[in-house]
Amino acid sequence: MKSVPLIPPVCLTATYKFAKSDDLIDVVQNHSGHIYSRWDNPTVQAVEKALAQLEDYAHALAFGSGMAAITTAILALLDKDSRIVFQREIYGGTHEFLHDYLPRLGVSTSGVNYYNAEGFLAEIEKGLTILYLETPTNPTLRVVDLEPLIEAAHKKGAIVMLDSTFASPVNQHPKDYGVDVVIHSATKYLGGHHDITGGFICCEESHFNTIWRYRKILGGVMDPLTAFLALRGLQTLSLRVQRQNESAIKIAQYLEKQKNVKAVYYPGLESNPDHAIARRQMKGYGGMLSFDLDADFETTKTFMDSLKFIKLASSLGGVTSLATQPITNTHVGLSPESRAKAGISESLVRISVGVEDVDLLIQDLEQAFNVIG
Ligand SMILES: *Cc1c(COP(=O)(O)O)cnc(C)c1O
């Protein structure tokens, strides 16, 4: 062969054929090749290898969604006597799994607010199997100081899991903090084009086989076509995220000057309470921001409905800028008290900055501010 495809082919195959029975037996017994795509698939392995390299771990495993990655990895790493300490301000689905589903199976879980470092250390001191963290947080972009929590958890022999979706591998390098299992929803920055649902975990050799076996049995593996799109997304990840970082700070600074805006939440702003931690812990401040309008729920809705260029949609991390009112979708399930504690008001707007011309995005915000007066 004088040449091979520059881009790896999409291996849309469910199974693999063998020349001899002995080869098949070897693959089943020694995991020495492919036998069935719920176990492994070459296209899926290609994107796993690419992400593992980006995050500096020996392995990555791809899943059919971020939630499949999270639930599979947690189930793989616990026993009936396990205890999980988790940060309360995490993705809603993860919170539901840790707070409602696992206790039904007899697993003890204990949630602590991100700002309560002493509470975290006290819970960790009691002993734990897994410490589960997520930073930056959704939707107020708070930055959790990882080092002291991870150090304390490791002293207790715990496995530390971190959902790094909001930062993407470009803005945060969890390996530097000794995170054992890094999680990404590929639906967001990794895919980057709002066209796939997928997830990943990254880990070292020690946890790889356990999580791989659970993925094989629970069945939430990524499909080859999604893997192809995720691999394609990874090629522009750094370009996209750098652009999103640059635009988000400009938008945050613009918002800070608006009379209709009560507060802007973006770790890149010097006025942000987490700015010092973010500067130390992150390589870029990200493309997510939120702000409080000086307005009631109805006026905030009018503001949202007046946006033309920025789309009214859930999700984040892609090329198109999206805006949501967390109270109406991502955080609709929270009680008014929990919402107030988490700083999620009825006038809170979250924006996922895309890769469009930042002047057009600011113009769009400007005309929406003019509508509400
Ligand atoms: C979206 C998201 C998830 C869940 O990912 P899915 O791909 O929707 O299953 C988990 N964590 C964070 C931080 C997310 O933003």
Image: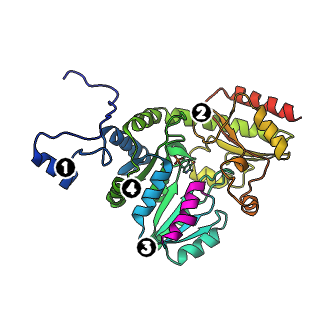
Q: How far is disc 4 from disc 1 in space, using C-alphas? A: 21 Å
Q: Which residue is mark 1?
A: 27
Badge 1 amino acid: Val
Q: Position of residue 202 (x, y in %)?
A: 42, 52
Residues shaded magenta? 90-105
Asked if residue 98 lies in the magenta stretch, the reply is yes
Q: How far is disc 4 from disc 2 in space, using C-alphas? A: 37 Å
Q: How far is disc 3 from disc 4 in space, using C-alphas? A: 18 Å
Question: With 73 as the anchor, is 58 left or right in this view?
Answer: left
First in sequence: mark 3 vs mark 2: 3
Q: Residues within 10 Å of mark 3 (few under 14, many from 20)?
A: few
Badge 4 amino acid: Leu
Asked if residue 213 lies in the magenta stretch, the reply is no
First in sequence: mark 4 vs mark 1: 1
Of badges 4 and 2, nearer the viewer stands 4
What is the quadrant of the N terminus in the image? top left
Determine which of the numbered discs, if any, sits on residue 80 in the image: 3
Q: Which residue is mark 4?
A: 218
Q: Which residue is mark 2?
A: 243
